[in-house]
Image (cartoon, rainbow, N blue to C red):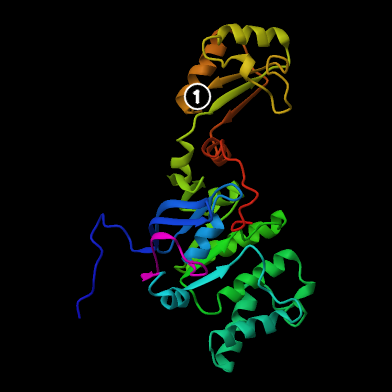
Amino acid sequence: MPTSRRVDGEQPPAAVSTVGLRKSYGDKVVLDGIDLRIPAGSVFALLGPNGAGKTTAVKILSTLITADGGQARVAGHDVATSPDGVRAAIGVTGQFSAVDGLITGEENMLLMADLHHLSKREGRRVAAELLERFDLVEAAKKPAAGYSGGMKRRLDIAMTLVGGPRIIFLDEPTTGLDPRSRHTMWQIVRELVSDGVTVFLTTQYLEEADELADRIAVLNDGKIAAEGTAEELKRLVSGGHVRLRFTDPTAYRSAAAALYDVTLPSSRLRSSGGTPLEESLSLQIAGDGSQRELRLLLDRLDAAGIEADELTVHTPDLDDVFFALTATTVPDQTEKADR
């Protein structure tokens, strides 16, 4: 039997795709015609301020609510006409844990196995494997109410995996977790993707998106403000610079004179503590931090016989991207869907 092959240059199949997706609550437009295409086996991160529509997008794609317009396909199924097909292919971990604290971790897992219509034998096998994978074996017989936040989140995702979904929606999965638990969750996401699972992640932690996502979209005022890899998004904004710090006021003034044509206006510059850079004996030079630019800068200092006490390079990060793309956003406190 002939098998289909992907032609070189052809895009991989989309696990999730939307065209013109719209949703409003009364006169509040939450999603204003968003287009997405998420390849299978990748991590996609949707960023945006509170109330931007991230959770609404997840709810539509996971068939929890219906869109007002546009089209969406998940795992090859239209979310409007084939919701059962979508549900059979996905797992969802929401902002708030679905763990039942009155029963044990193992009982939570077995309950999910029953909901997926697994036999008792198969349910116990799957539950045992996932409890071991998520390092929950020792706590499995204890009521989940006594679990730490990180343990509850791990159990939550383990429960999501009982049905073997190929697409997982993680809606702000690390909110409220300590740094160690967050890094544990990141490792879990990486392992899922290495197994071929597609992860749709919403998060307000920009470091998280930078660390995990193959592609990132920034949602603002109901529209996709920008989309691309982390590096592509960082190139959209300016702000790269080299910071020179001096302890000797004379050396500082000499450097300022030697670099007067490339330093940024001191009236616009503040140190991290809010002090004008001229008072903190620091100079800031715009640039991309490339080796060539650094060499030219250091050559000019050497020629003037000046040595800085500290040199740091700042390149735009996702914080810069986020603030630049969402600068005019004022959170709407009446918007209920994304709380």
The answer, for residue 39, to whether it is visible in the render is no
In the depicted structure, whether residue 267 falls above or below residue 294: above
Residue lying at 62% horizontally and 19% vertically, measured from the top left = 268
Q: Amino acid at mark 1?
A: Gly
The answer, for residue 5, to whether it is visible in the render is yes
Quadrant of the image containing the N terminus: bottom left
Q: Residues within 10 Å of mark 1 (few under 14, many from 20)?
A: some
Q: Residue furthest front?
A: 26
**Camera-side residue: 237 or 130?**
237
Q: Residue furthest left?
A: 2
Residue 335: x %, y % from top left: 61, 53
**Camera-side residue: 102 or 330?**
330
Residue under circle 1? 287
- Residue 27 located left or right of residue 176: left
Residue lying at 42% horizontally and 52% vertically, measured from the top left = 34
Residue 126: x %, y % from top left: 57, 83
Residue lying at 62% horizontally and 11% vertically, measured from the top left = 306
Residue 24: x %, y % from top left: 50, 55
| Residue 161 in magenta stretch | no
- Residue 181 located left or right of residue 232: right
Quadrant of the image containing the C terminus: bottom right
Q: Quadrant of residue 161?
A: bottom right
| Residue 68 in magenta stretch | yes
Q: Secondary structure at mark 1?
A: loop
In the depicted structure, whether residue 291 falls above or below residue 46: above
Residue 153: x %, y % from top left: 67, 67
- Residue 96 located left or right of residue 171: right
Figure disc tally: 1
Which residues lie in the magenta part? 62-78
